[in-house]
Image (spheres, rainbow, N blue to C red):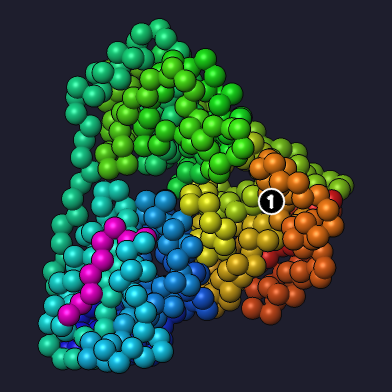
Amino acid sequence: MNGAEALLRTLVGSDVDVCFANPGTSEMHFVASLDRVSEMRAVLTLFEGVATGAADGYARLAGKPAATLLHLGPGLANSWANLHNARRAQVPLVNVVGDHATYHQRFDSRLQSDLWGLARSTSAWQRSAARAEDVGADAADAVVASYGPPGRIATLIVPADVSWNEGGAPARRRPVPPCPLVPPETIENVAKVLRSGERVVLLIGGAAMRERGLDAAARIARATGAKLLCETFPTVHSRGGGLPDVEKLAYYGEMAMAQLDRTQHLVLAGARAPSSFFAYPDKPSDLVPAGVTVHELAGPAHDVTAALGALADALGADAPGTRPAGGRPDRPSGRLTTESMAAAVGHLLPDGAVVVDESITSGVSVPAATAGGPRHDWLALAGGSIGQGLPAATGAAVASPGRRVLCLEADGSAMYTLQALWTQAREGLDVTTVLLANRSYAILQFELARVGAAGNGERARAMLDLHDPVLDFVSLSRGMGVPAERATTADELAALLERSFAEDGPMLVEAVLA
């Protein structure tokens, strides 16, 4: 058995049975081994950033890593932005990166690069396999390392001769370490703060954004009068179906500070202390108001759900009551605006849907419109690097067959990784993309003023405008095999969403906003 086959058999034996791939010459023995290891589902992507973004979306719902297959340093570099997003989302991900044969590297051929340095910038664990005999054990170590806790990126560099040499053997699956529990004294110390009668904000994130964590956090807030907030861009937020509706910490620093105004204590449960996304002249970067005492109940490496449950019990908080039925917006009609678009989504969102949100400015009304709808999971842009939406929706659909994935995608962001549509068509994935066409980088139009830049002239405005020429997403989507239609009214959008949700396979709706 060669090293490539040993690597593949170790991955599937470790329950890593999906690989998002963009291979090259150095990875051909991995590709050939797919015919002998049928348990591995290999998903071809046309750009490395699609592979890593899909692996991120997959891990968020599957709760386990996918593998990626990337080609040398340039392939890893092309994947970097969505590796950054995956790192910030704290999901497990196993990168397999092919390298030149060990004996060839000294020749410094054209594609030679600092592969180790590139991997180090996003990976919490990395190793270069030295021999075919060892690559199985290396892969098993990579899988365990990816789980953390918290989830993280593990990169295994595999030289071509390690893949093609004989002598490989699969390694046994390694046990995954559990998340450590929060010490009882920490629970009691935070409980004292919440019993104090002083003004407390409980800021939750990470795994606390799923059902059990949300229920426990809501119990704590009801029992103590604490204000409950959640992080701005959660990895997975379970919503609807009567789940507690948690107010998000605002994106803009001034609004976030207003939410924390008059707070005396800030309790963190799976979330970080808030800071501004960017620096602005004469505005603070630290969004924790002066005089606020910060307490960490549970960090990213802890079992935050168990910690919240223990805290609720320590406070004698009542168990979750009967959840009231939510309400949907009425079916909209007339002009297609951000508000009527949100109403159409809220009116029609299927039960059990997955929403992947890269809508940036145009989707601001959608969370409120869907809060009272059926149960769904919401995936946000955890790392802030645009170009994640379409790939993450692709990976989410692979991870959750039978669930409709709704991708809310901004037009500017879509152009970063539009190739994901081709993979959706090839794999027959149930993804509905609502392409929100406002013909601009609208977020940057806001930021131009917020950073104090004096740039309202014709040339500055042209750098943020997408009208000349107008992007034709219907043609672009159809050209990659995904059926597409254009909606210019709320009635058209609702009808197209209804059609897509009722049919199998992917579809794109270009929503031209007034």
Find the residue positioned furthest to the right. Answer: 334
Q: Secondary structure at mark 1?
A: helix
Query: Residue 485 lies in what quarter of the image?
Result: bottom right
Residue 35 in view here: no
Q: Is residue 285 magenta?
A: no
The residue located at (22%, 91%) in the rendering is 103
Side (left or right) of 303 relative to 350: left
Residue topped by disc 1: 444
Query: Residue 186 lies in what quarter of the image?
Result: top left
* 423 versus 104 height, above or below: above
Side (left or right) of 275 relative to 507: left
Give 305 or 468, whichever is nearer the viewer: 468
Q: Is residue 124 magenta?
A: yes
Residue 88 place in picture, x, y as percent: 42, 51
Residue 484 in view here: yes
Side (left or right) of 292 relative to 65: right
Give 348 or 131, whichever is nearer the viewer: 131
- Report the quarter where the N terminus lies: bottom left
Near mark 1 (Cα within 10 A), the count class, few <14, some 14-19 or many ≥20, is: some
The residue located at (79%, 56%) in the rendering is 461
* 411 versus 366 height, above or below: below
The residue located at (24%, 18%) in the rendering is 188
Q: Which residues are magenta?
A: 122-130
* 226 versus 509 height, above or below: above
Residue 137 place in picture, x, y as percent: 15, 72
The residue located at (26%, 61%) in the rendering is 125
Residue 89 place in picture, x, y as percent: 42, 51
Amino acid type at image mark 1: Leu
